[in-house]
Amino acid sequence: MEERTVLTAESDFLTVVFEPMGAIYEIEPGETLTIVFKGPPTHPGEIKHRADYTSASPGLAGYMMAFDSEGNEIDVNTGAPY
């Protein structure tokens, strides 16, 4: 199963932490980050909104990918563009 989630930074930066690696990516105001989870239908992955940041983690038997507003892939292990 594939599930896509789009995160948007409205008027302030939005910090996203890719779990379990702990890599950090900041979305600039007005930009988006698309996270793609691939895994079993019961739990492909999840997004958790916390007070200071948002975390994204794949399901136990799946994986995730991330893309910036321009469609460039972000390395979820380092938080840097490929």
Image (tube, rainbow, N blue to C red):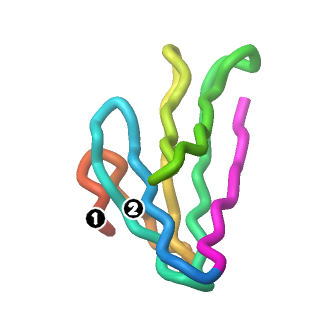
Q: Amino acid at mark 1?
A: Ala
State the residue at coordinates (51%, 15%).
Answer: 61
- Please, is residue 2 above or below residue 16 in the view? above
How many other residues sit within 10 Å of disc 1, few (<14), some (14-19) or many (≥20)?
few
| Residue 49 location (% of width, % of height) | 60, 44
Q: Main secondary structure of the magenta part?
A: strand
Q: Which quadrant would residue 9 be assigned to in this image?
A: bottom right
Q: Amino acid at mark 2?
A: Ile
Q: Mark 1 falls on what kind of element?
A: loop
Which residue of the protein is positioned furthest toward the front in this rendering?
Answer: 51
- The quadrant of the rendering that contains the C terminus is bottom left
Q: Is residue 52 left or right of residue 42?
A: left
As for residue 43 lying within the magenta part, the answer is no
Give the mark nearest the N terminus, 1 or 2.
2
> Mark 1 and mark 2: span between their CA atoms?
6 Å
Q: Nearer the viewer, residue 42 or 29?
A: 29
- The quadrant of the rendering that contains the N terminus is top right
Q: Mark 2 falls on what kind of element?
A: strand
State the residue at coordinates (45%, 53%).
Answer: 52
As drawn, the label of residue 80 is: 1
Q: Which residues are magenta?
A: 1-10
State the residue at coordinates (49%, 43%).
Answer: 55
| Residue 66 location (% of width, % of height) | 50, 55
Q: Is residue 42 left or right of residue 72?
A: right
Check whether the beta carbons of the residues at disc 1 and disc 2 lie within 8 A of each other: yes
Circle 2 residue: 74
Which residue of the protein is positioned furthest toward the left in this rendering?
Answer: 78
State the residue at coordinates (29%, 40%).
Answer: 22
